[in-house]
Image (cartoon, grey):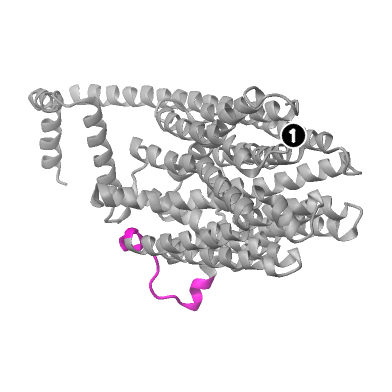
């Protein structure tokens, strides 16, 4: 741009008549219309800067609803898949002649283990080959292994069922990060619409578990428990077809089209293998310890090997790869804060939901359907929390919302950890059902949006991967820690209540530590803002001083 053009542009911007015309132009618009115009402007700007040619504005309302629904169903059915082992737990155990509490917990933990472990590699595959492709493949995989898990009942050993559940969990590991990456690429950062869409994604989690538990109860009590897997596979197959039709192929515009041998390095194979092995071995040790006892040599050997693979992963990512699966430049104070809060909160949630079902079925002698019915308030509360969070994210800093979330996790566990067995449902249990989903649906959207906004569009799969890895892996490892404590307290198997309460005390401790971390993170964010404001003020003063000196020279 020439100097004359620049001067002309400056005069146009400074023309008060133009400013008055602009004010008059927008004065008739409502606040909602102005926000929508702002969102549309941000969407166009991001498309120009990133090179992407598609956003939610190009969908049309009906297709946008279908698009969001298909992606939200990934979260819905992931949680329904968790319910497939928790709700009919003792029916499944009877089929395989399993009664040991530690071994029963593996039916749920094996699934959460692989969901959490394989999310990061799946997110990298999506960033490289296209999130849409991996998302669609994920539905096919999820459907296949859900179907096979149902047929595992014909095998006399529970090992095959554990194996099928673990492979079933790889399906959600492909769906969750790539589904969120598709949302992240379709909605501009910092807009109310993006906040609400991500909150919808989080809101369906408790609803998915509730609906899954209801149908699990129906099939287990009145038909046969494998039917919950076979019917689930049919639903997943239908969504697989719908995803092919609804998810725009243009969202994979950034993906590589011709794969070469050199591209293998971009998958960070050595780092991925080290990370996966570390997560798997560390988790197996914690979940197998309550089953065979920590005095069994291979449990602590697996634990040590897991730690060594974690160290190897860190060394590889820092020094020996050009394409780290977890780029260190994104490991900031904010991301560590989010990971810490999410891991502590969701580990306590896994303990809360698992041991609530044990108390209800084993100590209160409730049926699956009655137990599921008692969780209806959780679904309602989760939906309300998601809407509230979408609103609050535009009004306050996410760190404060995280304090509310961790407080909800802690209070929900305190209520269930101290509930008298013969107390009416409408006292502590009822309020726990209302409070606990606040933690889930305030923490997950907040964390996802923080990560999504902190990373470029080409790494949206990584942003979603980090949150989902921590969420799902924490559920599994939390069950292992709680199971270890329970097995040490209830050694003879005759003190169920004492063992269950000890597990809840673990959950209370975890969520309490999360509250402390959330407070520290909030204080740190306030401190950073004050430092930035001070620096900005100093820079402004210096700029004014320089402008004054220039003016004096020109006057002279």
Name the residue tied to disc 1.
504
Q: Is residue 127 magenta?
A: no
* Range drawn in magenta: 246-264
> Residue shown at 60%/48% (left/top)?
217
Q: Is residue 193 placed above or below 318 in the rendered structure?
A: above
> Residue shown at 30%/47% (left/top)?
46
> Residue shown at 77%/42% (left/top)?
482
Percent from the top left, x then y, of residue 282? 74, 55
Whether residue 291 is visible here, answered yes or no, is yes
- In the shown orientation, is residue 369 left or right of residue 47? right
Whether residue 180 is visible here, answered yes or no, is no
- In the shown orientation, is residue 101 left or right of residue 546? right
Percent from the top left, x then y, of residue 278? 71, 58
Percent from the top left, x then y, of residue 15? 10, 26
In which quadrant is the C terminus drawn?
Answer: top left
Percent from the top left, x then y, of residue 436? 59, 32
Are there few (<14), some (14-19), or many (20+) residues within 10 Å of tag 1? many
Q: Secondary structure at mark 1?
A: helix
- In the shown orientation, is residue 305 left or right of residue 463? right
Query: Which corner quadrant of the image does residue 242 belong to?
Result: bottom left
């Amino acid at each position: 741009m020439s100097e004359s053009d620049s001067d002309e542009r400056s005069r146009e911007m400074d023309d008060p008549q133009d400013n008055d015309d602009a004010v008059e132009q927008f004065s008739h618009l409502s606040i909602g219309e102005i926000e929508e115009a702002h969102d549309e402007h941000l969407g166009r700007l991001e498309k120009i800067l990133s090179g992407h040619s598609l956003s939610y504005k190009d969908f049309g309302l009906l297709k946008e609803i279908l698009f969001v629904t298909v992606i939200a169903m990934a979260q819905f059915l992931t949680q329904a898949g968790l319910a497939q082992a928790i709700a009919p737990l003792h029916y499944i155990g009877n089929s395989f002649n399993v009664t040991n509490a530690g071994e029963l917990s593996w039916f749920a933990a094996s699934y959460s283990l692989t969901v959490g472990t394989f999310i990061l590699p799946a997110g990298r595959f999506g960033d490289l080959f296209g999130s849409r492709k991996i998302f669609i493949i994920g539905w096919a995989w999820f459907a296949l292994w859900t179907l096979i898990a149902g047929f595992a009942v014909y095998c006399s050993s529970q090992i095959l069922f554990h194996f099928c559940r673990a492979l079933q969990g790889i399906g959600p590991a492909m769906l969750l990060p790539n589904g969120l990456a598709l949302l992240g690429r379709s909605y501009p950062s910092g807009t109310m619409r993006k906040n609400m869409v991500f909150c919808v994604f989080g809101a369906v989690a408790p609803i998915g578990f509730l609906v899954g538990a209801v149908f699990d109860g129906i099939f287990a009590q009145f038909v046969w428990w494998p039917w919950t897997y076979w019917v689930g596979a049919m639903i997943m197959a239908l969504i697989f077809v719908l995803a092919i039709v609804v998810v725009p192929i243009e969202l994979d515009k950034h993906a590589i089209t011709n794969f070469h041998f050199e591209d293998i390095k971009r998958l960070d194979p050595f780092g991925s293998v080290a990370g996966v092995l570390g997560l798997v071995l560390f988790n197996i040790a914690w979940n197998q310890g309550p089953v065979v006892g920590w005095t069994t040599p291979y449990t602590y050997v697996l634990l040590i090997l897991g730690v060594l693979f974690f160290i190897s992963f860190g060394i590889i990512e820092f020094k020996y790869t050009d394409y780290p699966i977890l780029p260190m430049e994104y490991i900031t104070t904010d991301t560590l804060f989010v990971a810490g809060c999410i891991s502590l909160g969701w580990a306590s949630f896994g303990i809360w939901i698992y041991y609530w079902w044990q108390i209800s079925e084993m100590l209160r002698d409730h049926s699956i359907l009655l137990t599921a019915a008692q969780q209806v308030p959780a679904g309602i509360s989760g939906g309300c929390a998601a809407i509230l969070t979408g609103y609050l994210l535009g009004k306050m800093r996410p760190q404060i919302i995280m304090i509310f979330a961790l407080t909800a996790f802690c209070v929900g566990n305190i209520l269930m950890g101290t509930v008298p067995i013969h107390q009416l449902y409408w006292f502590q249990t009822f309020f726990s059902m209302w409070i606990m989903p606040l933690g889930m649906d305030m923490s997950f959207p907040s964390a996802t949006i923080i990560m999504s906004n902190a990373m470029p569009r080409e790494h949206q799969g990584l942003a979603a991967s980090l949150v989902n890895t921590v969420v799902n892996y924490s559920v599994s490892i939390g069950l292992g820690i709680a199971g270890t404590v329970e097995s040490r307290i209830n050694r003879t198997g005759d003190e169920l209540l004492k063992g269950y309460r000890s597990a809840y005390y673990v959950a209370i401790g975890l969520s309490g530590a999360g509250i402390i971390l959330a407070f520290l993170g909030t204080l740190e964010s306030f401190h950073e803002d004050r430092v930035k404001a001070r620096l900005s003020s100093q820079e402004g003063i210096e700029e004014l001083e320089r402008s004054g000196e220039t003016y004096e020279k020109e006057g002279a």
